[in-house]
Amino acid sequence: MMKKLLCLLSGLFCIVVLNGQTYKDEKAPVASRVDDLLQRMTLEEKIQQLSMTGLGDFPRLSEVYGVCDSPFESLEKIATQSRNAKQHAKENTRLGIPPIQIAECLHGLLAYGATIFPQAIAQGSTWNPELIQEMASAIADEASSVGVDQALSPLFDLIRDPRYGRNEECYAEDPYLVGEIGKAFVIGMQGKPEETILRIPENKIMCTAKHFAGYSVPWAGINLAPASIGEREMRTLHLYPFEKAVKEANVYAVMPSYNETDGVPAHASHFLLNQILRDEWDFQGYVFSDYGGLSHLVNFHKTAANKAEAAYQGFSAGVDLEAARPDIFPHLLELVKSGKISESQIDQAVKRILTAKFKAGVFDKKYADMKDVEKRVHTQEHIDLARQIAEESVILLQNNNRLLPLQLDQLKDIAVIGPNADQVQYGDYTYTRDNKTGVTVLEGIKNIVGDKVNVHYAKGCGISSLSKEGFPEAVAAAKKSDVAVVVLGETSVILSGLGWGKGPGELESDEPFTTGEGYDLTDINPLGVQRELIQAIQKTGKPIVLVLVHGRPWSIKWEKENIPAILEAWYPGEQGGNAIADILFGKVNPSGRLNATIPQSVGHIPVFYDYKPSAKGINREPGTPEKAGRDYVFSSPDPLFPFGFGLSYTTFEYSDMQTSKEQFGCEDITVSVLVKNTGDVTGKEVVQLYVNDKVSSTTTPVVALKRFKKVELAPGESQRITFTLSYKELGLWNQNMQYVTEPGEFEFMFGKSSEDIQCRKTLVYKNE
């Protein structure tokens, strides 16, 4: 009792010392701090909390903005600006409210000197949420060291159209896989939900789930174009992973998407931001506009005649904070004074932002210190992790006659050819493409072969250039080699201190960016003359290994028919060259699996694994160029490579599928399968569980991913893989837009991919 009394007196003394300023007492409850601060603020100060500016602007301003963005610069510059801005805000403004410092952290802190991990599309192809959670924790550690409080990551968009340039920022085409990888990222970056419900732990940062929602399926694949999505499809596919982020990972912020759906821009959508996010999901965080998203209501979507009207539309729909600079929300002041918006509505939005600030420790943290930064950023542990993720992300698509792995003792000469053979490519939202910051494929191969093998390098051609001047040198290199490794691909837009452009140490080039935000394509074949380059090398008769380093699925029909070995590497991060070389020479057994279906051509789009029963047509008489048919006349609707596919240097056998029941009700159901490594090397297999609702009142996919697990097995080793599902996970949105699980037969399938089903059983659900 005495101990409790002393604690109470201590708390009262602390409040007295702070002159009654409860919000400055870090021991006080968050709600009390928020209420105390809010009642001290003027209306103008409240509205300033709903806006954003840059860290570099802050010391020159008397206003107290809610958020500041980090510059796309060096670690030292970010840390210095962070310290200056937050110290100024706390010591030289009326109430001493520091800003939330945000940064891009998609696959590493966007800063020169930070660790560059594989791009998001490569993270998804690991099928390893635990590994991505570890990566996100490492990124949070690096970002928090320079003062970052919140990441504008991760994306929960789906890869459903390869033309769309931002596919590289997405995890997968499947909502379950996206939800699991994205949830792992949020938990790794923010901390465990049971902790973050109270506060963000030390060295962690808040996350922003984006883009809400349906952003990645624009008309004609053009970024920001409208999305033709009905409510049922929106709920089933595009909202599903966001719901996981909110309910299972406690994500702190959500960013609306730029696009419109059914005539309503997301930044003005009451359905998305109020009905779904707040009312149905009980989201407790704050809604962070995409950069310029509110201004788009006036100058892009044309739903608002002026900025004041845009402020009313966006704010009343549920947007809490305007990014990137004050343009629309300053007009909230006149809207309150005119009575169109109440001050209590402003208070609610400000409360959400202040709550995030107090929970994230923004008022109480130490300022960024470069001595601390040097200890925590780009550590050997983080470099090793980047390499492991790259190793697990690379997908072996083809390996005819077991060309791979290459045997070092059987090689005298190796040709390394292609526009991305000696050039790092990291993908969108990185600071640089300077080779000094990472390992190229050429360098990775040299690291392995040393002086035991002669390496002959030739660039061959550019990424999108039509020049063939380099062909003769490339062909000559192949002719004098035992094998040719040809590295093709793309180059993505990057962000640096100069804006959308090149980073330090990069040579000027006429090559345009070909993927990333705003870089969409009408053709998904290899760009420029890259296909002609590999065709010229193929004519030498030498064995070829094709390595793809890019940010979207490519149509590689010719390559599949003519090249014996193909590796899909996406953008593999700063250690990509080492990881690819390790796989080429068998030091690492490839374990990546396709997270996006690869179509035969652009004309086959859209193509994904979870298609509806009617999606392949009714005639089922596919044609060929030599013999016409139907569905299509001169082709089949089949994918080039299916979702979930990936080869290994060993083999796996599935057997003895078991289920806890053959009939089940409103309960959990357990399914399992025995998996054995039947080859002669250790390997990792991704065990995939799919389900089909055989008869349903609204149409459902022919297969839908419900569980997966990556497991490592030694030669001859077996392991039983067991999954437990709730009956609710077998549900659908019926004709009344109610989520229900309907009685009937469900087929459970274990597969090596969505098309390579190994075991299946039909179970019956009865809701009695």
Image: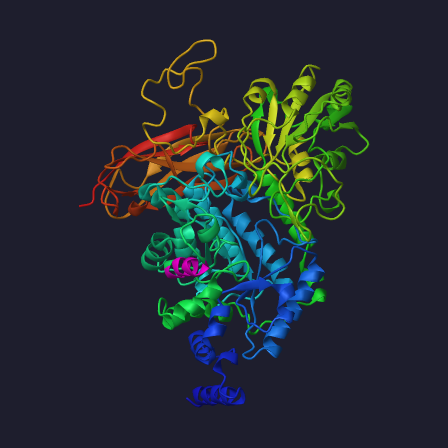
Viewer-nearest residue: 297 or 153: 297
Specify whether 576 is left or right of 505: left
Residue, far top: 626
Can the viewer see residue 195?
Answer: no
Q: Is residue 591 above or below residue 194?
A: above
Where is residue 729 shown, x and y percent of the image? 32, 45
Q: Is residue 220 above or below residue 292?
A: above
Viewer-nearest residue: 60 or 713: 60
Give the image's coloring scheme: rainbow
Kindly report the secondary structure that dominates the magenta region of the rendered protein: helix
Residue 313 colored in magenta in the image: yes
Residue, far right: 451
Q: How many marks?
A: 0
Q: Is residue 684 above or below residue 50?
A: above
Where is residue 93 shown, x and y percent of the image? 58, 77
Viewer-nearest residue: 152 or 438: 152
Residue, far left: 768
Specify whether 114 is left or right of 9: right
Specify whether 501 is left or right of 125: right
Q: Which residues are magenta?
A: 307-316
Residue, far front: 305
Question: Quadrant where the N terminus lies?
Answer: bottom left
Viewer-nearest residue: 662 or 520: 520
Specify the quadrant of the image occupied by residue 451.
top right
Specify whether 76 is left or right of 699: right
Residue 59 colored in magenta in the image: no
Where is residue 768 shown, x and y percent of the image? 17, 46
User: Which residue is depicted at the point 79% across and 34% down?
Assistant: 450
Where is residue 56 shown, x and y percent of the image? 65, 64
User: Which residue is depicted at the point 46% across and 69% down?
Assistant: 355
Can the viewer see residue 537?
Answer: yes
